[in-house]
Amino acid sequence: MITPTATISTRFGDIHLELFADLAPQHVQNFLDLARKGFYDGTTFHRVIPGFMIQGGCPNTKPGARGVPGTGGPGYHVNAEFNKTSHVRGVLSMARANDPNSAGCQFFIVVKDSTFLDGQYTAFGRVTSGIEVADAIVAQPRGPRDMPNERIEMTVRVVE
């Protein structure tokens, strides 16, 4: 099986990802489908917590969107696919609400080992290069609700 990969491009540079299709097939397929149709383009990293993670992919962060950043989704949910991947630096995982089966489109990249998330969130990939870009993003000045003071937009491309 060919390992799917994707690239998140930001003004700080590119983050290259390897996706774990064997461990979280529904999450990987969902991420790939959303990326291929441009869903993530123009969304931002709307939550950055130093010593923890950067989160993005909310449609309410696109220019002109009316919803509250961090509350948007694709209109459906993906059931949890917990696996043995530990949430160590560089792991890509899906954000969710309180219900473990509420993931949709928002994702996060762990910038510091956060193993307390293991078995609680679906890890579905890892950074293969560009972790320094995530470090630059998490270091940006932020305001209430851990939102960066300046927009950090992304585009996501699947590497076919």
Image (cartoon, rainbow, N blue to C red):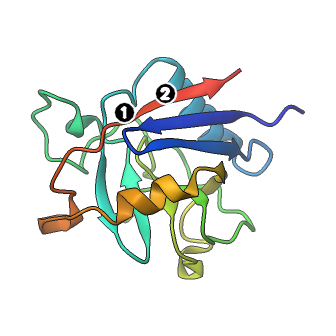
Q: Residue at x 47, y 17 (%)?
A: 37
Q: Amino acid at mark 2?
A: Leu
Q: Nearer the viewer, residue 56 or 76?
A: 56
Q: Are marks 1 and 2 in contact (CB under 8 Å)?
A: yes
Residue 69 visible, this orientation: yes
Residue 152: x %, y % from top left:
29, 44
Does 38 appear above or below 61? Answer: above
Which residue has dot 1 on it?
74
Does 116 appear above or below 24? Answer: below
Quadrant location of the N terminus in the rendered image? top right
Of callouts 1 and 2, which one flags the residue occurring earlier in the amino acid sequence?
2
Q: CA distance from mark 1 to mark 2?
A: 9 Å
Residue 111: x %, y % from top left:
51, 68
Q: Residue at x 60, y 62 (%)?
A: 90
Which residue has dot 2 on it?
34
Picture quadrant where residue 32 is located: top right
Q: Residue furthest bottom?
A: 116
147 relative position to 128: left or right: left
Residue 8: x %, y % from top left:
50, 38
Picture quadrant where residue 123 is located: bottom right
